[in-house]
Image (cartoon, coloured by chain):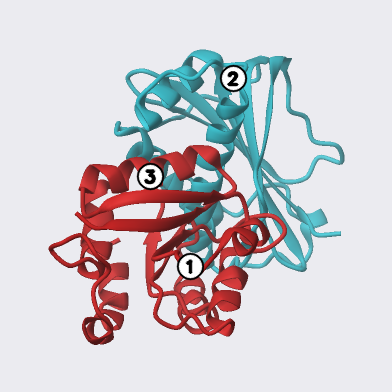
Amino acid sequence: MGEIKALVVDDSKIMRSAVKRTLNQLMLADFEYIEAKDGEDALEKFNDEVDIIFVDWNMPNMTGVEFAKSIRDKGYEKIPIIMVTAEKSMGKVDKALNEGGANEYITKPFTADKMHKTISRYFDEDGNIASDEEEDGKQKSFFKSILNS
Amino acid sequence: MRLDNLTELDQIPEEIVCKVKESVVNTIGSMIGADVEYVDETNCDGPLNGIIGNINIFNSEHTLSLMLAIPKESALHFSKVFIGMELPFESDDMGDLIGEISNILAGDVAANVEKVGFRGQSSLPTATRGSDLTLFMPNKPPTEKMKFVTDDSEFWLTMVLSESK
């Protein structure tokens, strides 16, 4: 399996653990984790080696949407950003997609099955992040993943 | 639903109460993997030995405060089913867990009460742990206290509607 560097951003240590535990269960890849407790911390810890980002919305100092927007503004257009959040209204989903540039939206509480349905298309069978060409189609799955949530 | 003058309102509008009740049953039930039942019990004012998750849903005019009061035994049970192990009650992780449960509940409540005209955003959660805890509301704003049970736990949700000042 390929080694994937995942940045997990949540002000709750319990939820960071839940995300990591779920990803490990899914065995889509061999994950190495970087953890951050809010958007500011995540910006400090972010580097070119990060392959995928899981980020909460409601956090102190800098929200998940602000963080995601900062990443896109820095020119990282392709890195998958998965919002994992308790915010459920369609207005919030729209904001995460259009203002933050997130690829996917998973609502808490999530199950391993829901996580798998949402993110498995970002991984190829060797456990690597799938290529750019495939990602174009994946963007269209955004609203589908919300309906599944 | 009119919330123009809260001083004339002696209780939280029934539409909001119903939506919050629905959110508690669905969200907490989903988090702990159990059937959550509302109990129509008026006499539930005893002091709490446990932990309270606090969170607000607010807009520029109104604030809906949610206080999730969980007895110690129920909190220990929640930790076991939510993360697979029983957390020490006195630990920071327990506060983190109850804060996160409150946060998830508030996310659902915010989406649900929007359907009946209350549009707001969630604050960050806090948690208060202690014994002989009693909630009281200065100035007597519209308040609703509800009890919920599962086979292995019980908890209360107090919600208060006030002006955002």
Image quarter of residue A117: bottom left
Q: Give the Cα distance between marks 1 and 3.
A: 34 Å
Disc 2 designates what residue?
A: B43
Q: Quadrant of the C terminus of chain A?
A: bottom left
The hue in which chain B appears in the rendered picture of the protein: cyan
Q: Disc 1 is attached to a residue of which chain?
A: B
Q: Marks 1 and 3: same chain? A: no
Residue A34 to residue A148: above or below: above
Q: Give the Cα distance between marks 1 and 2.
A: 31 Å
Residue type indicated by callout 3: Lys
Q: Mark 1 or mark 2: which is in front? A: 1
Q: Give the Cα distance between marks 2 and 3.
A: 43 Å
Residue type indicated by callout 1: Lys
Image quarter of residue B46: top right
Q: Mark 1 or mark 3: which is in front? A: 3
Please name the residue shown 55% across and 18% down the image: B71
Residue type indicated by callout 2: Asn
B38 sits left or right of A141 in the view: right
Disc 3 designates what residue?
A: A20
The hue in which chain A appears in the rendered picture of the protein: red
Disc 1 designates what residue?
A: B115
The crowding category of the residue bearing disc 2, from other C-alpha atoms within 10 Å (few below 14, some 14 to 19, many at least 20), is: few
Mark closer to the chain start, 1 or 2: 2
Expressed as whole percent of the image width and height from the top left, the position of residue A16 reads 47, 44
